[in-house]
Amino acid sequence: VQDELALRYPDAVVVPDVLFTVDDRVITSAGIASGIDLALHLVATRHGPAVAARVAREMVVHTRRNGHEPQASAMLRHRCHLDDTVHRAQNLIDARFDQPLPLPALASAVGVSERTLTRLFSRATGLTPLRYQQTLRLERAQHLISH
């Protein structure tokens, strides 16, 4: 996606694998989730890191990430594809990662066979649906342990 952006807009400087960039008065984010990080960065810049941390807690998001950090969250890392079926499956897994979500139910919910979902999901993300769910669970556990 980043390479495609750079090809489409050769005059733009595309900074790969960052959440957001600040260039004088122009501030851009990599997407919706990183836009939250950008907004928290602006709050911290104008009102201090304590206020930004309070806002993050109120929003129930991870602690504000630096704009130069890689997109560490599995929800972000494995979303840089264009497969709508896989995005729909990921939306379901993201919303219910802490609950059992059997492959037959997941495949049925997105309107494909189990085999097709597994093939599409693996091609788009490099993970099976189950491994993706396990990765989300592990990240959540690590976040809870560290706070």
Image (spheres, rainbow, N blue to C red):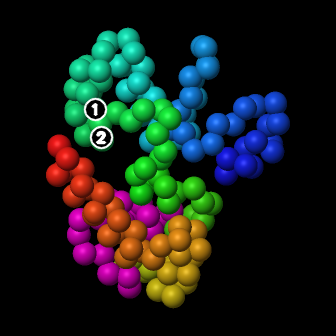
Q: Are marks 1 and 2 in contact (CB under 8 Å)?
A: yes
Image disc number at residue 56: 1
Q: Which residue is mark 2?
A: 61
Question: Does residue 120 show up magenta in the picture?
Answer: no
Q: What kind of element bears circle 1?
A: helix
Seen in the picture, residue 28 relative to 121 is either above or below; the reply is: above
User: Could you tell me the amino acid type at mark 1?
Assistant: Ala
Seen in the picture, residue 106 relative to 47 is either above or below; the reply is: below
Q: Which residues are magenta?
A: 87-104
Seen in the picture, residue 75 relative to 70 is either above or below; the reply is: below
Q: Position of residue 138 (x, y in %)?
A: 28, 63
Seen in the picture, residue 124 relative to 70 is either above or below; the reply is: below
101 left or right of 86? left
Q: Position of residue 88 (x, y in %)?
A: 48, 64
C-alpha separation, residue under disc 1 versus residue under disc 2: 5 Å
Q: Main secondary structure of the magenta part?
A: helix
User: Could you tell me the amino acid type at mark 2?
Assistant: Val
Residue drawn at x 22%, y 58% is 141
Going from N to C along the chain, the mark reached first, 1 or 2, is 1
